[in-house]
Image (spheres, rainbow, N blue to C red):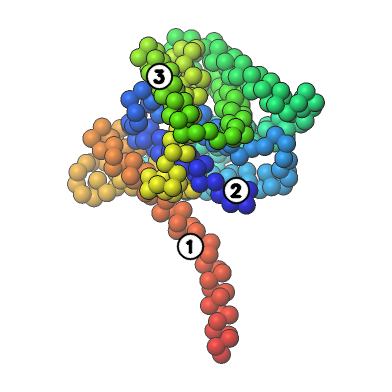
Amino acid sequence: MTSRNESVDILRGIGIVAVVAGHAGTNIGIQVLPVYSFHMPLFFFVSGLLFSDEQETPALTTLRRLGKLLAASFVAFFLYDIILSAALRKFGYPVVPGKVMDFGKKLAWGGGFGAAQWFVGCYIFTILYFEMIHRRLFKYMSRLGTSSARLIFLVVYFVVAVGCIYASGAIYGHATDEERVAISRTYGVSVFIIRFIFSFFFYYLGTVIALIKKRTIKFYVLLFMSLYAIQSICYFNQNIYFSMQIMHFYNKYTPIITSVCGTLMCYIVAGGIHGSIFGNLFAVAGRRSLSIFLNHIVGFFVVNVIFVMLGMVEPSNIGSKHFRFMEWYTTPVYILGGLGYPICVSLLLDRLKKLPNRCLRSRQRASAAG
């Protein structure tokens, strides 16, 4: 793509705000659409919007893209999980320092400051699958016609996603919230595979939706209202929360329904607020989504440090796997900190990247003046 699609940036921004809000201890959003009912499938959907069945991406381009993602993830892991956690442990914080060899585990299961890195691992495998395998399968199936091939794949991936939910049920059974983490560690490889395959449907749903021609405002309003009605029925009759990280579902019916409804509702909203001040704000977050994703938990900790310096809390008050103090009182502050700190980090990195060129231009001007 030669230019950024701002609607995609807005949608990505909505998703990243949902992630930060969820980790800050809230399900901020409209009542019937808690973030843990859709927000991680939304990110696979966003990536699918930018994927084409027919237009091949050079392998080197894909590897560079994933290499940058891995490099950024490793730097965040190294700085936070190893250096910062080790320093905190010396000051008496209940944090276990990471090791370089743990990086692969973080990509598979997350944890600690790298709690969100499980998504990076799953995302990389999903991209590789669609670039290297799906596209070849599609080329073969397109003999039936491109539209027919896309419909077949969408149905197949939907069936596979449903199968993943049933497979998850076989692993967890009727496990409680306390038991599910221990179970996910015991069946870690199976959970990773199920999570990876589950993402296919939402990724490809984005690919198909991107090909649909734009409709009238009335159509989108009616679609939004219909999705809201379906989501409301699920919300008032079922437990619609689920964790894609450990693939634990409270029932077999709502995870795909609420993920599709929530994702498409956000997609409609992103298109509707494009060009407005709200759209611009979400677009800023969307353009900085990787930095926010990797650094927002450290942003929570920065808020903690400020609280300690102000004498509002003691370090011993820490009691959350996401390193939050008293989050039930301070959720809005954590959301702002979780967004603001990573954005500042990314802006600083942008300046550092441009510094060599600025120095070079300064020398060139000095030489010309001399």
Count neighbours of disc 2 (C-alpha within 10 A) and say few if under 14, some if 14 to 19, many if 20 or more: few
- Could you tell me which secondary element the residue under label 3 belongs to? helix
Q: Are marks 2 and 1 in contact (CB under 8 Å)?
A: no
Q: Amino acid at mark 3?
A: Ala
Q: CA distance from mark 2 to mark 1?
A: 18 Å
- Could you tell me which secondary element the residue under label 2 belongs to? helix
Q: Are marks 2 and 3 in contact (CB under 8 Å)?
A: no
In the displayed structure, 231 sits above or below 113; it is: above
- Could you tell me which secondary element the residue under label 1 belongs to? helix
Q: Quadrant of residue 167?
A: top right
Q: What residue did someone put label 3 on?
A: 229
Which residue occupies 38% across, 25% down? 33
Residue 351: assigned label:
1
- Dot 1 or dot 3: first in sequence order is 3
Residue 105 position in % (x across, y down) = 55, 33
Q: Residue furthest bottom?
A: 370
Residue 25 position in % (x across, y down) = 33, 32
Q: What residue did someone put label 2 on?
A: 68
Q: Amino acid at mark 1?
A: Arg
